[in-house]
Image (cartoon, coloured by chain):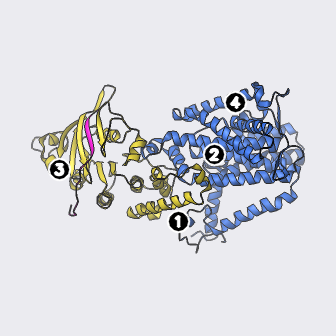
Amino acid sequence: MFYREAGQFKTSYKADQAIFTITQDKFFVGAFLVIAFGVVPFFIDDYWANAILIHVLVYALAGLGLNILTGYCGQVSLGTGGFMAVGAYASYKLTTSFPEMNFIIVLLLSGGVTACVGMFFGLPSLRIKGFYLAVATLAAQFFLVWLFNKVGWFFNYSPTGMIVSPPREVFGFLITGPEASPAVRYLFCLSVVTVFALAAKNIVRGRIGRSWMAIRDMDIAAELIGIRPLEAKLSAFAVSSFYVGVAGALYFNVWLGSAEPTEAFDIFQSFFVLFIVIIGGLGSILGSFLGAAFMVLVPITLKTIMVDGMGFAVGAAKHVEVMLLGALIIFFLIVEPHGLARLWQILKEKLRRWPFPY
Amino acid sequence: MTYERTIGDTILAVDQISLSFGGVRALSDISFSVRQHEVFAIIGPNGAGKSSMLNCINGFYHPQKGTITFKGKTRRQVRPSEAARDGIARTFQNIALFSGMSTLDNIMTGRNTKMNKGLFWQAIRLGPAEKEEMEHRAVVERVIDFLEIEAIRKTAVGTLPYGLQKRVELGRALAAEPDLLLLDEPMAGMNLEEKQDMCRFILDVNDEFGTTIVLIEHDMGVVMDISDRVVVLDYGKKLAEGTPDEVRTNQDVIDAYLGVSHGEDE
C-alpha cells in the first residue's frame, strides 16, 4: 500500500538508471545505512562484532567477488579460499615489510596482488569451460595453500608457520591486533564493504558488466558483436580476485588476527563462499549480502536454539546444521536458482500491488 | 522501390573463397561483391553454404582459400570481434540474444565497442562514465524507438515471444551502427504480418541509416521484392548472380532451387 512508484516520474535517463529508482527504496536503504553506521557501533560488543557482524561483512565481500566471476561472467571458480589466502599473505608481507604504510593502501595493494594471481589462474578459462574450469581453479586452491605452507618467506619464517597480524592504525584508530575495539573494527569493515559494494554495482551495470553478462549468456554471440573474450574473462577474474583478496586481507587482519593456511583457507572456504553465492543469488549484488548473512546466521541460530534452548549436545547441533545446509542448497538449486535475492524481488513485486492486486 | 538511392562503390568483395570441413566442401571458389547501400540476398537450397558464407564474412569461420575485402582492407582470416569493430554486425538464424539480460541491456551491448571508459571510471561511475553511458543510452533509445519496442525495454529477453526476440536481435545489431549488416534468415518462422514488419524495418534501415545489407532468406517473394541483387549458391558453388529478374529467369537457378510454379514434367 505504501510501497509503489505511482506518481514517480523519471525525466532523464540518469534517473531511470539509478540504483534505487523508487523513493521508498531510497528511504529504506538510507535508513539502513544510518543505523549501520550511526547506531550499531554504540551497542556493539565483542561477541556481536566477531561472531556475527564482521563475520557477515567479510564473507559478503568474498561473496561479491565470487559473484562477479560466477554470477556475472559465468566462470565457475573453486579457488576462492586460495585467493583469500593470497590477499591475507600479501597484506601480511606488506604490512610487516613496510610498517608505516597506511593500512588502506595495504588492503588495496593486497587486492592488486590477488588480482594478478587470479588473472594468471584465469588463463585456462580462455580454453575450457564449466566443470573443467572448476577443476583448474581447484588446482589454484591446493597449489596456493601448499605454497604458503611450504615457503618460509611468506610467513617470515615464524616457527609455528602461523601469521599474526601486527597492530595497525587507520586515521589514529587501532583496527588490527587484540587491542582494537570491536566498534572500530566493525566500522572499518563496514566502510570498506560499502564502498566496494557500490563500486561493484557500478561496474556490473556499465559497459564492463554488460560484456561479462554477454559472455555468460552466450559467448559466441558476444564475440560476434565485438566483445573480446580474453578481455572480458580476464577482467572478470581480475576484479573478482581483487575483491576476494581484500576480503582475505580483512578476514585475516581484522577478523581472525592470526591464521594458518591449511585451516583458515582450505577448500571448505571455497565451498562456503560458493554456497553464499548460490543461496544468495547468482548475478546479484544484494544476493551476496543475503547469502552471507544466511550462511553465518543459520548455524548460530541453530546452536542457540538447540544447544542453549533445548539442551542438545554441540555435536548433534553441528550435524543438523550440515544436513540443513545441504538440504537448503538442493532446495535453492531446484526451486529458485536465483536465490534469496530473487525471492526478495518477488516479494517487492507483490508488495507493490498489495493489497489490491488488480 | 520508390525512393531514390545512390548505390555506391564496392564495400565488400569476396574473392575465391573456399571452405571445407574435413572432406566436406562447404564453399568452393565463391566470388561476389556487394556495393555500398545495397540490399544483397544470398539464396539457395538447404546446405548450399549460405550461412557458412556469412560466417566467413564476419570471421567466425576461417576459409582455407581466398580473400575478403571489406572497406578496402583485404584479409583472409579475421577474429569475429575485430570484424565487429570494423563495422560488420549480424543476426543469427537461431536467436542468439543474452537471455538473462533485459532488452535495453541487450541492445546496449551492441554499443560496447564504441564505449571506452576504463574500469576505474566505471567503478566510480559519477562523471565521465555516466556521461558516456547516457550518450549511448540516447542512441539505443533511438533504435528502440525505430523498432517500436519501447514497451519491452525492461523485460528480460528470455521471456519475450519469438518475433519480438528477432526484433531485439536486429536492434542489438543496429545499435553498433554497422556499415554492413548480415541478416541470417531474419524472417524464418514468422507469420505474414511479422514478415511485413521485418521487411519494413530492413528497408528503413537501409534507407535511413544507409546500411548495406546482406541477407539470407527462403521466402522468395520477400527476396525478390526487397533485394537489389541476388547471388544463388548450390552445394557450395555459385550458380548465378544478378538482379532479381535475371536470377528468376536463369535456367540453372530454376532447376536447382526455384522450380517451376506449375510444372509440365512434375
Chain drawn blue in the picture: A
- Judging by the rendered image, the residue that carries numbered circle 1 is A13
Specify whether disc 1 shares its chain with disc 3: no
The residue labelled by disc 4 is A144
Secondary-structure class at tag 1: helix
Query: Real-space Cα distance between discs 1 and 3?
Result: 45 Å
Judging by the rendered image, the residue that carries numbered circle 2 is A67
Residue with the mark numbered 3:
B243
Mark 3 surroundings within 10 Å by alpha-carbon count, few (fewer than 14), some (14 through 19), many (20 or more): some
Left or right of B246? Residue B135 is: right
Separation of marks 2 and 1 at Cα, in angstroms: 27 Å
Contact? badges 4 and 2 (CB < 8 Å): no
Q: Chain of mark 2?
A: A
Classify mark 4: residues with Cα within 10 Å, few (<14), some (14-19) or many (20+). Answer: many
Q: Is residue A55 left or right of residue B225?
A: right
**Residue farthest to the left, as pictured:** B264
In 3D space, how far apart are the residues under numbered discs 4 and 2 (Cα atoms)? 21 Å
Spot occupied by residue A70 in the image (x, y as percentages of width and height)? 60, 42
In the rendered structure, the residue with mark 3 lies on which chain?
A: B
Q: Image point 20% across, 63% down: which residue? A: B2
Indicate the amino acid at tag 1: Tyr
